[in-house]
Image (cartoon, rainbow, N blue to C red):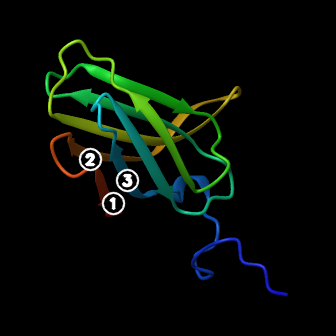
Amino acid sequence: MNITFFDDPLEGPRAPEDVRVQQVGIYIHEDKRRVAVGVKMTPFRQRPSMEITLKNAHGETAATMTVIEALRPEISFTLHLRDSKPTVEYETAVILYYATPETERQNVHTATVYVDLDGPMEQLFEIKT
């Protein structure tokens, strides 16, 4: 029996400095106050942490989430928009980083996409690395 842990067997786990965001998927709930964010990363040797931030058109932070040491290369969450003046467009930033109690935070990749709440409910963004 052959067991495969990754979609592409030629793409093995990467060192921390080579881990990248490959896709960001967005699903806008009907109330337009909840946004599901899915992130697909390259396979990794060490579990990366990530910070997801949504900012409205006024530059206000509407939602933020921190994931400590993701277990899998594909992960998704629902964020609740809590900005005081909602807008139609939101900047979504995903920052992959590594940090330990002994070392400072090292950002290894940032992916930024722009979401239109009046656009399709499902939006998929391929990230060029």
Sequence-first disc among 1 and 2? 2
The answer for how far apart the CA atoms under marks 1 and 3 are is 11 Å
Q: Residue 117, percent across and down?
A: 20, 39
The answer for how far apart the CA atoms under marks 1 and 2 are is 9 Å
Q: Residue at x 50, y 39 (%)?
A: 77
**Quarter residue 104 falls in:** top right
The answer for how far apart the CA atoms under marks 3 and 2 are is 10 Å
Q: Residue at x 63, y 81 (%)?
A: 9
Q: Residue at x 36, y 63 (%)?
A: 129
**Dot 2, crowdedness within 10 Å: few (<14), some or many (≥20)?**
some
Sequence-first disc among 3 and 2? 3
- The reply, left or right, for residue 73 in relation to residue 102 is left
In this view, the residue in front, 67 or 31, is: 31
Between circles 1 and 3, the one closer to the viewer is 3
Q: Residue 38, percent across and down?
A: 45, 49
The amino acid sitting under disc 2 is Val
Q: Quadrant of the N terminus?
A: bottom right
**Dot 3, crowdedness within 10 Å: few (<14), some or many (≥20)?**
some
In the rendered view, would you say 121 is above or below 80? below
The disc placed on residue 113 is 2
Q: Which residue bears the numbered disc 1?
A: 127
In the rendered view, would you say 1 is above or below 30? below
- The reply, left or right, for residue 112 in relation to residue 41 is left
In the rendered view, would you say 78 is above or below 44? above
In this view, the residue in front, 93 or 86, is: 86
Between circles 3 and 2, the one closer to the viewer is 3
The disc placed on residue 25 is 3
Q: Residue 68, percent across and down?
A: 62, 34
The amino acid sitting under disc 1 is Ile
